[in-house]
Amino acid sequence: GVVYGVTTNGFFLADGENSYIFVNMGDNWANPVKIGDKVQVDAKFSLVSGYCMLKQAELEVIGQNETIPVVSVEKDLTFVTYTWM
């Protein structure tokens, strides 16, 4: 997929207009990706508060400056947290 958003603890990945997911890399990850990078991810799937995400990911950047149609982001994000109910 293609990275379309980066936070301090992960990034958002899309592989189509309606196919996207958050990849949680943890609190202290050394960010090797940027928007437009095409990445290959091997991770565990998780469902948290009704939202799908990937965690414990290993990733490889396989391309740069890629584009993919996604819904626009309305607010800058620096950290994504989930509250268990």
Image: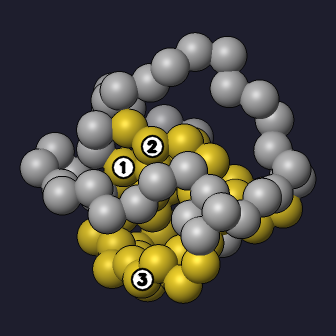
> Which residue has dot 1 on it?
10
> Which residue has dot 2 on it?
6
- x and y, in percent, of residue 28 in the image: 11, 50
Left or right side of 76 for 63: right
Are discs 2 and 1 less than 8 Å apart at CB? yes
- Could you tell me which residue is drawn at 31 percent across and 63 percent down? 32
In this rendering, the label closer to the viewer, 2 or 1 = 2
Residue 82 seen in the figure: no
- Estimate the spatial distance between the alpha carbons at disc 2 and disc 3, rounded to whole Å: 15 Å
Residue 75 seen in the figure: yes
74 is higher (above) or lower (below) than 50: above
- x and y, in percent, of residue 76 in the image: 50, 20
Left or right side of 37 for 15: right
10 Å neighbourhood of mark 3: few (<14), some, or many (≥20)? Answer: some
- Could you tell me which residue is drawn at 33 percent across and 80 percent down? 58
In the image, which disc is placed on residue 60?
3
Q: Quadrant of the N terminus?
A: bottom right
